[in-house]
Image (tube, rainbow, N blue to C red):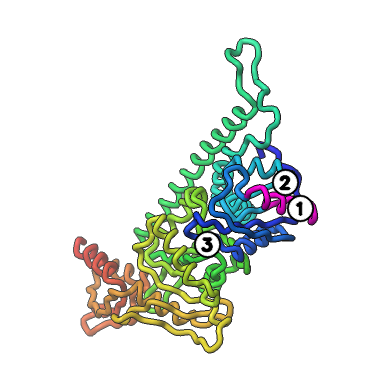
Amino acid sequence: MFFERPEGGESSVLVHIDLDSEREQEDPVEFEELVRSSGSEPVCFIKGSRKTPDARTFIGQGKLEEVAEAVRQHEAGLVLFNHSLSPSQERNLEKALKCRVLDRTGLILDIFAQRARTYEGKLQVELAQLQHMVTRLKRGWTHLDRQKGGVNLRGAGETQLELDQRMIRQRIKNINKSLAKVRAQREQGRRSRKRAEVPIVSLVGYTNAGKSSLFNVMTESHIYAADQLFATLDATLRRINVPSFGEAILVDTVGFISHLPHKLVEAFRATLEETSQADLLLHVVDIANEDHDYYIEQVHEVLTEIGADDIPTLQVLNKIDLLDGFESRIDRNDQGQPERVWISARDGLGIDLLLQAISERLGHDIVNRQLTLSPNQGKLRARLYERGAVTTEQVDDHGQVVLSVRLPRQDFDRLMQEDARR
């Protein structure tokens, strides 16, 4: 790190203030889950209410003394706020409390830093951390008047703070260059998949909704899945076979959260592009959570921000094993199109219905036809087999091949056009 913070342990004091000036309050229960997901152990949760935040310390003098007493009593090394703090507020709070202070954004960044596994994921987290850190450098230095100068150097030189800020800006520049290469590789992969006409199905949803568990069941994979927030950060792609349709690419992505910090949305844009380029979104919902309607709204907000709100979506209501009297089923709209599927990824309930619904949503315009091919149309026959479109094959009395095929209309039209040009 470019600056030192006070040494801190894992015990933390949590602070949540209900503000009259905020239209949407942060969820204290979700905040505590975030803290535990970070590896910190909450020892005290201090709550209060104000009309507006205090400009200097966010919480005011009386509440500040209460927090300071809790820090001393529990020997906590960390105070976590369920709010966004300005750099000056963080500095003033650390000075008064004599321990490390993190706001909600800093906490989420810390969790992301722990969970990133791939090269791209680590770069994205570091970028977001540096962008968050650059405005908060001042608190780490007590010798900001120290100048860098010397023989044959004009002017007063740079303060240590300016030097560190320049180092961070250079590192941010280097990371952006590396991420640009990653984005180019992703775009190349997307173009290849598009040429092969393989549809992309992307899992989206609020964090801890069960996306990774569902991904593992559908792909027979073993990616990390846990009952904690942000268990998955890195986008994972696998091919799946959708019955009565063919191959598709299934993508598992980072979970969303209410008021996802803008720095993270920007930093993870390369990963989130896998969602914005999808042919179908599977919006996984923890239906057993009493706040699921609110979480659905929050996911829609993030999808709108990344330009994915107009992509066809199939809602997957997960964790029915935690509800009484619920069985797996497909809910359809007035046109008979699947809208929602009720499943349990943990117990494997309703996965067959989910695949059926995906097949119907992807193959809403499917061609079922019998083709008679002459001997010189062997290339067309091979292409149909490559697509997995042939259901039966026979040879008639004239030596011609009779195929029964089933495939999406756009694929059928493209193959017929290619054959006609030969």
Q: Secondary structure at mark 3?
A: loop
Which amino acid does the dot numbered 1 rest on?
Answer: Glu
Of circles 1 and 2, the one toward us is: 1
Work out whether mark 1 precedes mark 2 in sequence or the reverse, and give the earlier one: 1
Q: Is residue 248 above or below residue 394?
A: above
The dot on residue 108 is none
| Type of the residue with mark 3 | Gly
C-alpha gap between disc 3 and disc 1:
36 Å
Residue at the (62%, 36%) spot, across then down: 137
Q: Is residue 421 magenta?
A: no
- Residue 264 x, y percent position in the rendering: 52, 51
User: Which mark lies nearer to you, 2 or 3?
Assistant: 2
Camera-nearest residue between 358 and 290: 290
Please state if 123 lies on the left or on the right of 353 as rendered. Answer: right
Q: CA distance from mark 2 to mark 3?
A: 33 Å
**Are the two marked residues, 2 and 3, in contact with CB atoms closer than 8 angstroms?**
no
* Cβ–Cβ under 8 Å for marks 3 and 1: no
The numbered mark at residue 255 is 3
Q: Earlier in the sequence, mark 2 or mark 3?
A: 2
Q: Identify residue for label 2.
A: 97
* Residue 117 seen from this side: no
Magenta part, dominant SS: helix
Q: Is residue 253 left or right of residue 398?
A: right
Residue 261 drawn at (x, y percent): 52, 52
What residue did someone put label 1 on?
Answer: 69
Q: Which image quarter is the N terminus in?
A: top right
Q: Position of residue 358 (x, y in %)?
A: 40, 75
- Label 2 crowding class (10 Å Cα cut-off): few <14, some 14-19, many 20+? many
Q: In which quadrant of the rendered view does residue 197 lie? A: bottom left
